[in-house]
Image (cartoon, helix red, strand yellow):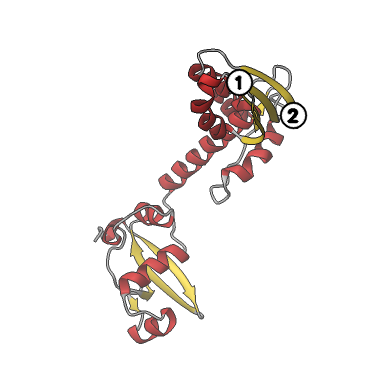
Amino acid sequence: MVNVDKTVIAKLRREGKNFEILVDPEKALELKKGKNVDLNDVVATDEIFYDARKGTKASEHELKKIFNIEDKSEICRIIIMDGNVPQTSDMMKKEVELRRKQIVQIIHRSAVDPKSGRPHPTQRIENAMNEAKVRIDVNKPAEQQAHDVVKQLVSILPIKFEIREVNVRIPSQYAGKSYSTIKQFGKVIQENWESNGTLNITIELPAGLQEDFELALNSLAKGTVEMKIVGSK
């Protein structure tokens, strides 16, 4: 069990009743995110309250009736997973910074400078986000926010999202071991094994990944890869 002095109140409302427990906020958040956390490291006590501040305990009869189980530990888990767990200011700052970094990486991977066709460095993207005073929503997935962020950056940074179709030809001696790497970078839209064993393949990938894609394949195929852009959108 955790130190009561370091807990917050996790709350869940069911059938018109409030149910509250005392939890470690960081461990509870880890549990909500699906991490393997021992419940004893999350809850301060297995007591379940109607009002934790007043110490008003929930009746066992009503807990069983509403949750349809008797195990208080499992009820505590349900309250954490389905209910609201307040976060401390430090936790919120960490969550915002983590989500910001995720958004920066998505933009770096998927967007390019329209003039050069190359991705912007991550630091340049971060600086532009700071200048544009971009607000990060920790409750919204990074993928959903990235496009909105780019719209806010265009007045500061020349940037656009782009998907490219890239055709690749790899000699037979390297084709087999290169195939799995190719699939890691994008979606295969056309594939042809030529009579001499050469792999002729076209994939769709985020424009910002093209340089890494070329480096990875040329490293595997000793610089023998032929590559060209055949389309973009």
Instruction: Say which quadrant the N terminus sits in.
Output: bottom left
Q: Nearer the viewer, residue 159 or 43?
A: 159
Q: Residue at x 63, y 43 (%)?
A: 145
Indicate left or right for 114 with 183 as reference.
right
Residue 24 image-quadrant placement: bottom left
| Residue at the disc numbered 1 | 196
Q: In the structure shown, which secondary structural element does the residue marked by tag 2 occupy?
A: strand
Q: Position of residue 107 (x, y in %)?
A: 61, 32
Q: Nearer the viewer, residue 82 or 199?
A: 199
Is any part of residue 93 visible from this angle?
A: yes
Is any part of residue 161 visible from this angle?
A: no
Q: Position of residue 19 (x, y in %)?
A: 42, 74
72 shown above or below 129:
below
| Residue at the disc numbered 2 | 232
Q: CA distance from mark 1 to mark 2?
A: 29 Å
Indicate left or right for 19 with 131 as reference.
left
Looking at this view, name the residue that lies furthest to the top: 223
204 shown above or below 70:
above
Residue 159 image-quadrant placement: top right
Indicate left or right for 90 with 116 as reference.
left
Q: In the structure shown, which secondary structural element does the residue marked by tag 1 occupy?
A: loop
Q: Residue at x 35, y 84 (%)?
A: 59
